[in-house]
Image: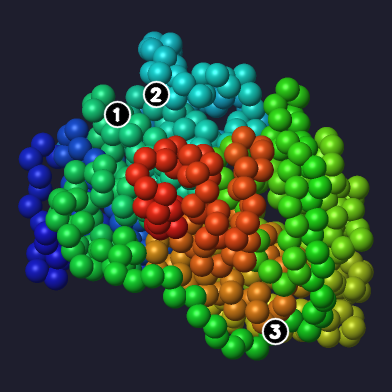
Amino acid sequence: MTSTEVQDHPAEPAGALLDVRDLHVSYGGVSALRGVSLSVPEGEIVAMLGSNGAGKTTLLRALSGTLAMQGGTIDSGTVELKGRSLAGLDPAVIVREGVVQAPEGRRIFGELTVDENLRAGAFGRGRREGRAEAFARVYELFPQLQERRGQQGGLLSGGEQQMLAIGRALMAEPKVLLLDEPSLGLAPQVLEKIGEIIQLINRQGTSIVLVEQNAGIALKIADRATVLEVGQVTLEGSSAELSESDEVRERYLGLGRGPQIGKVEVVTPVTGRRSALPLTVEDLTVRFGGLTALSEVSFTVEPDSTHAVIGPNGAGKSTLLNVLTGVYRATKGRARYGDAVLTDLRSPRIAALGVSRTFQNLALSPTSTVAQNLLLGRHRLTKAGFVSAGLRLPAARREQAEQERVVAGIAEVLGLSDHLGVPLTSLAYGDRKRVELARALCAEPSLLLLDEPVAGMNSEESQQMARMIAQVRETLGISIVLVEHDMAFVMGLADRVTVLDFGLCIADGMPDEVQRDPEVLKAYLGSTEGSEEEVGEEIGEAGP
């Protein structure tokens, strides 16, 4: 293993296919990458590790030619594919040259079918020959997609959407496949399958650059790995070498320390505090055509508690949150918040009751500043009309000042004060996740629904988010419904856990009970091999 403090330009591995040398990248004059060098040998998987904001996604943008779309520029350095410079080429040309990216966040076309999404990926080929073979390859790798080839992408589970995003990239026949956080929001069972498929794609002749927060899976499947911190390479070497590094083991593998949530006093920035009410879900059933997403699900969330909903991808967790917020309509059953029947109300009425949420895939305005995104969360609490606000009348100015005060207070609680004037696009993914949480809190909820709040975060960042959520709940006295795949995170926060599998409730109880339930272990890990205690410990430690 080498460090850039010792060697600025490490020796190039034999047979390098993709070669990056001394790359410097900036956004509007702000440096994002400083002297980064990376070689991807032919037929290997190279993993890129690092905290959110380290520059991993920026590096992928530079490789794929999409940097300018985000306001970034290559200031110096080279990016070459088999000796040909890729710097300055149009992204479509880079795709035709053989460098193809599957972007972070499962960015598929939700309104298009699986077949149509894959066909869109084939546009980058520049020729029609071989498309049938490409389709056959993708469907062989992902049989679930072939079974759902006529289904809209937006109705697929998170794991299936990730498969579709990778499959769409493969339709362009890449020489080098750039994978940005393929484990994002995946349950352990699906995560293991994705890892095996990535290795199979590599064995079929595709070199891979793998950006991952889940260092465990990345180091397991990669040949080599590089660690980025604050835009610079700090460690690199074989995966075996980095796996034995104390720094990597503690910071990225989460070994040597347990969850440290703790309790910290926080002064609440929100003035209008409302009492939490019981949330009762009774025999809730949701069907989409012939597909049953939820089947007679029942549970109760007590006031001022954190209630986790877990389960494999496709279990119905996000569907549940969509019903609770009025996005989807229940086919049968109901959900009550206090005396109000949520399943009879539209989204604005539900929000007015004090129900707020975050989303699995970020639902923020990318071109707006952090402050503007947070003020959007205050919209339903704003009394000034369009005319008075537009004319900047005294009452409207006073209200605007108060809203900005509240936003600044919430930003301080979540460590976002220094980012208020910064456009969202310039923030790292982990920071954007905190903005999403802050915006939900700006609505002054009494019931907060969190959909995978730590997806894409490493162990250290997950612990920081856990502390923030615990502090928010204690300070504001709100109830939280938490959907998350990081089991160490869930078990450290939840008072009670409900487990879904294929739309059915298979368990409901205290965290210690649930994590040792044989049905839960079978659904979540796909196996009950080993003692109950051993597998229970495994589900409690699952995560980055």
Percent across and percent down for residue 451 are 62, 54
Tell me the element at label 1: helix
Q: Is residue 265 left or right of residue 18?
A: right
Residue that label 2 marks: 141
Amino acid type, mark 3: Pro
Residue that label 1 marks: 200
Q: What quarter of the picture does the N terminus occupy?
A: bottom left
Amino acid type, mark 1: Leu
Marks 1 and 3, how far apart in space?
51 Å
Task: In the rendered structure, find residue 329 and report the number of the disc placed on it.
Answer: none
Residue 116 visible, this angle? no
Residue that label 3 marks: 269
Q: Residue 153 occupies which quadrant of the picture?
A: top right
Percent across and percent down for residue 206 are 27, 30
Considering only order in the chain, which callout, 2 or 3, is on the residue closer to the N terminus? 2
Amino acid type, mark 2: Leu
Percent across and percent down for residue 414 are 57, 76
Percent across and percent down for residue 13 are 10, 45
Callout 2–callout 1 Cβ contact below 8 Å: yes
**Point 79% across, 42% down: residue:** 284
Q: Residue 200 occupies which quadrant of the picture?
A: top left
Considering only order in the chain, which callout, 1 or 2, is on the residue closer to the N terminus? 2
Q: Nearer the viewer, mark 1 or mark 3?
A: 1
